Structures are given as C-alpha cells and as structure tokens.
Image: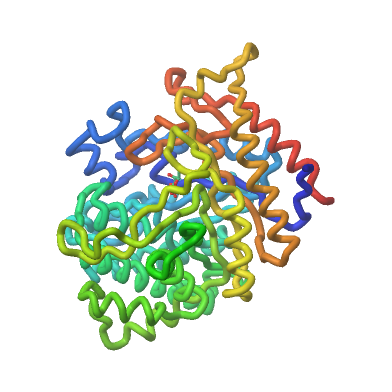
Amino acid sequence: MEIHLPKHFFMGAAMSGPQTEGAYKIGGKLENIWDTWSDCSISDFYNKVGSYVGNNFYERYEEDIRLMKDLGLDSFRTSIQWSRLMDPDQKLNKEGAGFYHKVCSCAREQGIELFMNLYHFDMPSYLFRRGGWENREVVEAYVTYARTAFREFGKEICYWFTFNEPIVEPDQRYRDGIWYPFVRDAKRGMAVQYHLSLAHSLAVREFKRAKEEGYLPEDARIGLINCFAPPYTREDPSPKDLEALRMEDGIRNRWWLDLVAEGRLPEDIVKRLEADGIMPEIRPGDKEILAEGKVDWLGFNYYHPSRVQAPEKRTDENGDPKYSDPYVWPKARMNIYRGWEIYPKGVYDFGMKMREEYPDLKFFISENGMGVEHEERFRGENGEIQDDYRIEFVKEHLEWIMKAIEDGAQCMGYHYWALIDNWSWNNAFKNRYGMIEVDLAENYQRRFKKSAGWIREVINNREK
Ligand code: FCB
C-alpha cells in the first residue's frame, strides 16, 4: 500500500536533551541523575558508556537540523535539560539558555517547528539528593523551572510538553527497581506518580499564566507525552484477567488520560489504591491543582503493546499488592534486540479508544521506532546501512495510523524516534534507532541509512 500522508500532518523527529547533547559539564551544566548513576556504577551501562556523551548534538545541532530539513521533515521534538537551564539556586543559567536559543534560531531558519519537552527522566542530582519526586519541594522546583523556560523561550517555541512518559520513572526507578536508585516499593512508586501528576498540573497552570502575561503567543499549545498503549489480555479472558486489565490500564493510562482530559484522577483506581494502603495523601487544595492539568493535545509514544493476565499471587515478595502478571501472547512477533513485541495495529486501537473515550483530545504519535543491535552487519557495498526492517516497521505503523485517521481518530502527526542514532539510557549505543547513523569511531560523523531516503520519498508524496 502507498502511504499518502495528509497535507496537514506533522512529520518529524523525536529526540531528547540528555540522550543527544553530551557536553555534560560544559556551560554550567549541573550533574543529573544519569551522570550520578554513571559515576557510581559504570558497568551498569552497555560497553561502559555512561550518560556523558549523547551523540554530540551540542556541537552538531546545526548539521542535524539541516539533515532534518534535507529529508523534508517539518518538526523536531527535543527537551531542555533542567540541569543545563537552571543553576543550583534555581535561577536561569545564561550560558545554558544560550545554547537552546541557538537551537531555536537554527530551527527557525530551517523552517522546522520545535516541539519542546521539559523533562525526559533527567532530574538534577542536587534535587534527587533532596528526595527527587518523592519530595513535594522538588515539585515546586520543577514549577520554577517550567515558569523560567516559558518566559525565556515563549517567543521562540509554540509547542510545549510538560513530561515525557511520566509513568516510566515510578515504574523503572521506584516499583520495578530497574533504574537507579533501584527501589522496589509500591507506596514510594505511587508517591512519585502522584507528585509527577501535581507537577504536570502546576506547570500547565504556569503555562496559562505565561500566556495571560504575554510571554507566550495565543496559539501556543501545551501537552503531555506518554506511552499510553492500551493493554491487551488473553483472547478468552477470565473475570480475573479482565480485572488485571482494568487495573493495569487504570494505573498506567487512564490515570494520565483522565488527568489531561478531565483534570482529575480516575476515582475507581484511587479508591483501590487507598484500600490497599499505597495511595499518597491527597492534601487540601490538591484537587484544584489537578483540575488545572487539562492539556491542548497529547503525544503518544508507541513501541510495543502491553499484555497482561491475572496475577498468580496477590502480593509480591515485599507484600506489596500485585495487580497483574505479564502475558506472553503465543503469536507475538518480536524485535529480538530490544525484546519488544512489534504490533503495529496498537496505534489504530489507541486511535479508536481516543475517538470513543476522549473525543475532544487531539494527539500525535510522538515516538515510534525500531532499535537494532550490530547494524554494521547490514552495511551494503556503497557503505550505507540497508535497514529494510526499519522501513517495513515504520511503513506498517504509518499504514495503521492512516487507517485510524480514516476511521475518525484525530491524529495530527508522526515523529520518528530517534532520527539520528543516540544514547539509550543504560543500553547506551547497543541498539541503534536512527535513520541516520552515528559513527562513534569517526567522531560522531553522520551518514544516511537506507530508511532516510525512504522517508524522504514518503514525505515527498504527501498530499499537496
Ligand atoms: C522511550 C523513551 C526514549 C527512548 C525510547 C527508545 O521509552 O522515551 O527516551 O529511549 O524509549
């Protein structure tokens, strides 16, 4: 099937500050939680490549934005690093701001629309040492940061996002103990999730104020980006499987969707968490804060579906409640390098869910991509990586997106993660996602892969 992108449909690249910039101690940049983890346990990172490097975007941003233009992309999402923009007294770091101003003017010159996110798992370490997202004071510090960013860049950036995947930090750092500081505690995880929800809502309040005060133009928009994929269960589910599905969906998706669409948390889930003794205290005034959390649109990061079934045991080894177990679908098609299931129809199902349950909320696919290990195996005689698997992956997802739009989903665009190979958390440079290769042995030199030429064609064929 030929892909005919609609005329008004963002086609762009997604990346983040901490995964691309490098320059981790330059220009007054403070240490963040990834640098702290890298310092204390470098062998946790693939090939011992810690967070310091990025893909050299700090020096190469002009080239990178030109490459985006060359491929015909119209938009680019990255993030400001809190640890670069703010000093330890929570005042603007002028040198840090200077870098982002340069990125903004370069994007403007190239006619690329910037989508700016404020937080991509990158807590400054001095705030992490004060308790990070477990401490409400840190929520206040985030709000100061957001306010500063809106005021500083309000004339240059129209599209803003408060958080990327706010579900990931409570999950990875505080519930599943996979990321530093490796906590496995449901109650602490919920405290983090709740404080992130307050932080998001307070940042939206600041956004509205900045608009009223003339720092941002009338058409500026605010959103939240999350991996909202609706979970699936067995084809012949038991009532307990369906209950597991409801809880999984409730904690990971509905929690955020109700917040950003309706300005509140899902009552059934809050009640259940309270009954299980893991819901943080909702203080007087919090409901009014959450009511401010409504956004203009959503970013939906989609790599893989989640599949769950009834848990075998009702509690885990710490005595914390367990709401579901993973379900391995026998027909799953896997990306073996990342261990993620490939299920392109998931974008369609999400679009239909939005159409039915949150019809007023527009969204775009804010991340989608395929990470592959040892891609040099696929280098052709002309030196170019022949990443046909990536072309197939993106094509299938775009086809389902087009079908979702036909069937009434309000999907406004697609951003590929990550257009240019970048540093992936503790996997570092193990799996490469880019349509543009980064040669680590040749001073981060950029080179097109086959998929770059393909996406250029797709964009060329868009409805005129
Ligand atoms: C997403 C993250 C992004 C990147 C991709 C592969 O969950 O938002 O930073 O690492 O996964």
For the point 31% across and 57% down, the residue is 171
Give how far across and how far down residue 444 sits, in percent: 47, 25
Relative to 178, 160 lies left or right: right
Furthest-bottom residue in view? 284
Looking at the picture, does residue 270 appear above or below residue 232?
below
Q: Nearer the viewer, residue 455 or 348?
A: 348
For the point 63% across and 57% down, the residue is 348
Residue 223 seen from this side: yes
Q: Nearer the viewer, residue 64 or 310?
A: 310
Give how far across and how far down residue 427 sits, in percent: 36, 36
Residue 93 seen from this side: no
Looking at the picture, does residue 237 appear above or below residue 212?
above
Furthest-top residue in view? 381
Relative to 156, 42 lies left or right: left
Give how far across and how far down residue 300 sits, in percent: 53, 58
Relative to 333, 108 lies left or right: right
Q: Quadrant location of residue 201?
A: bottom left
For the point 38% across and 68% down, the residue is 240
Give how far across and how far down residue 3 sits, in percent: 76, 45
Furthest-left residue in view? 318
Furthest-right residue in view? 464
Looking at the picture, does residue 270 appear above or below residue 119?
below
Figure coloring: rainbow
Quarter of the image for the N terminus: give it.
top right
**Total numbered circles:** 0
For the point 84% across and 51% down, the residue is 464
Q: Nearer the viewer, residue 281 or 35?
A: 281
